[in-house]
Image: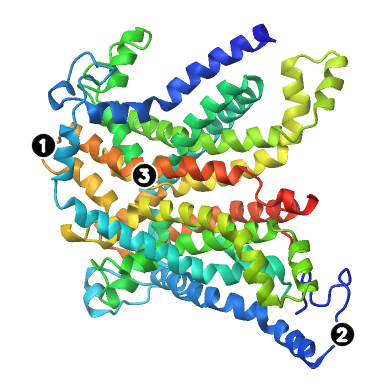
Amino acid sequence: MTSLTQAPETGTAAPTPPRSDETVRTNRLARFTPYGLVGPALLAFAVVLGYPMVRLVWLSVQDFGPRSLFTGEAPFVGLGNFTRVLGDSDFWAVLLRTLIVSVACVAALMVIGFLLASLLRQVSSWARVMLSVCLVLVWAMPMVSASMIWRWLFEPQYGVLNWVLTQLKVFGDFSAHDWFGSPGQALFLIIALIVWKGLPFVALTLYAAMGQIPDDLYEAAGLDGAGRWSMARHVTLPILGPVLAVLVLLEVIWSVNSFTPFWVLTQGGPDGGTTTLGVYSYLEAFTRNDYGGGAAIAIITVILLAALAVLYVRRLFAQGEVTG
Amino acid sequence: MRNKRAVPNTIAVLVSLVVIFPVYWMFATALKQPGKILSATPEFIPWPISLDNFHTALTHGSFLHYVRNSLLVSVSTVLIALVVALGASIALARFRFLGRRAFLIGLVLVQMVPGSAMVIPLYLMLRSVGAIDFVPGLIITYMTFVLPFTIWTLRGFVHGIPLELEEAAMVDGCGRFGAFWHIQLPLLAPGIVATSIFAFISAWDDYLFAYVFLKSQSNYTLPVWLVSFQTSDGIDNGATIAASAIFSLPVLVVFLLVQRRLVGGMTSGAVKG
């Protein structure tokens, strides 16, 4: 298998140079070139990813508490951590909450993202530039800053969005409204933050994908009497299918992995009411000092995500984005 | 035509306003006079402009220290990642070798592992070598997400360089390394710049690892400093928001610049022309 696919040395397209000793030597050398090039990366991966992952798995079968931090010794407990975690009703509440957050985020991202992408295709170029610049700026906002801003926007006394909501007179009086006092409302704000931050990527990706759809299809559909809605339904959506699928997979994974907005805004509270899997494993390990339990929760999360990740990889390779 | 676009254009203006508002509000709040920030009826235009909030933010803790820590960690991470990734990305894009597919799959999968899962073993790992609360120790943890990203993205850029150019150089008598040095590398430069900037931003933005691994205040990176405003008693909203603005501004500017560069096809004309 060690051959140069696209490499030009022995390429047929190029005129073959006279075969000297030197080219023979380079060919032999070339066989090992890819390994030499990948070697450092493999080594680095072994240290920064391989070892920690093995350690994570190993931790999950150990009773690793605060004492183990100092002695370095931790008793082997088999699947004890897993049975304990799975037997805890908190875990199932957290899992359910994670699913709800994830589904809400992804659904909102897809629907709003699709609408924004369609909007970008219909507007004049000045409006398109304006809207895309706004989207790119939101995309670039660091998550830590965005979370701090979010808290300020919804600050009970002086939050500007509380004021706006009150002025709208549709939802009632929001002056002195503490969003972070109730888990449901706090979760709603966190979801809104994740959607706001994630929207540019989805909208711009869909916009680019829509640009690939030939105009003839819309013209043909128009001749057949299709309106705007049925064009979107019968032309745009089916063609965008694969892109949408990839976006959904990525966004589910990213929303489950999300940590910073939760931690900065609520630290999982009030009363654990906004704790999702990432925060839960963190709390278990670093607040309750149960590193084994935290590792078990992390591994359960990875296993749940693995199925989606595998689907994503298959899509990626199937679409020829990566030449396997 | 005019009429047909009037409605979507109006919607686009409204949507832009809504989407950008939090970013605008960050700068507007930061630029207000400290006394005007807490007003029952919000003032939407910061006037007269005042830099007092920035002053308060910059004198909270030792700001320059945190800038140095953040830069040190992010720049080192990106440089190390680039050196390691360049070879790997060329190998993946230009050679077919045993284990290539597995490597590619691993590269994608590894990026799906949550940071909150990696943080536990990394903590114990760094602890056992005494690298907790040691700023350069963070570089190792940032490699976990910067390295796979860098290899993956660079691979795409290498793939985008037409093979014909290298072939032509080699027909003209360049060796493989010569072709790389004279042809591939210059064409790859914009891709390397773009990749490094994205990688830099992801390290610059990290909160989780820095929060877990850095204990003493003098070792904070900027994100940890930023969040520390909130928990220290007596929240000064103006200073907090000014700090967020200081932290975000370079990223916003750079991102806008790079975004353009990524969109422009880099070598598309090279072969046809």
Q: Amino acid at mark 3?
A: Pro
Q: Amino acid at mark 1?
A: Gly
Q: Give percent across and percent down for residue A243.
A: 68, 41
Q: Are marks 3 and 2 on the same chain?
A: no
Which one is in front, B118 or B147? B147
Judged left or right of residue A134, residue A145 is left
Q: Secondary structure at mark 1?
A: loop
Q: Give percent across and percent down for residue A90.
A: 36, 47
Q: Residues within 10 Å of mark 2 (few under 14, many from 20)?
A: few
Q: What chain does mark 3 sit on?
A: B
* Cα gap from disc 2 to disc 1, whole angstroms: 79 Å
Q: Secondary structure at mark 3?
A: helix
Q: Give percent across and percent down for residue A190.
A: 38, 35
Q: What chain does mark 1 sit on?
A: B
Judged left or right of residue B35, residue A129 is right
Q: Which of disc 3 and disc 1 is earlier in sequence? A: 1
Q: Amino acid at mark 2?
A: Pro
Q: Residue at x 39, y 49 (%)?
A: A91
Q: Secondary structure at mark 2?
A: loop
Q: Quadrant of residue B131?
A: bottom left
What residue is shown with label 1?
A: B234
Residue A154 in sight in this render: no
What residue is shown with label 2?
A: A18
Q: Nearer the viewer, mark 1 or mark 3?
A: 3
Count of marks overlaid on the render = 3
Q: Which mark is residue B250?
A: 3
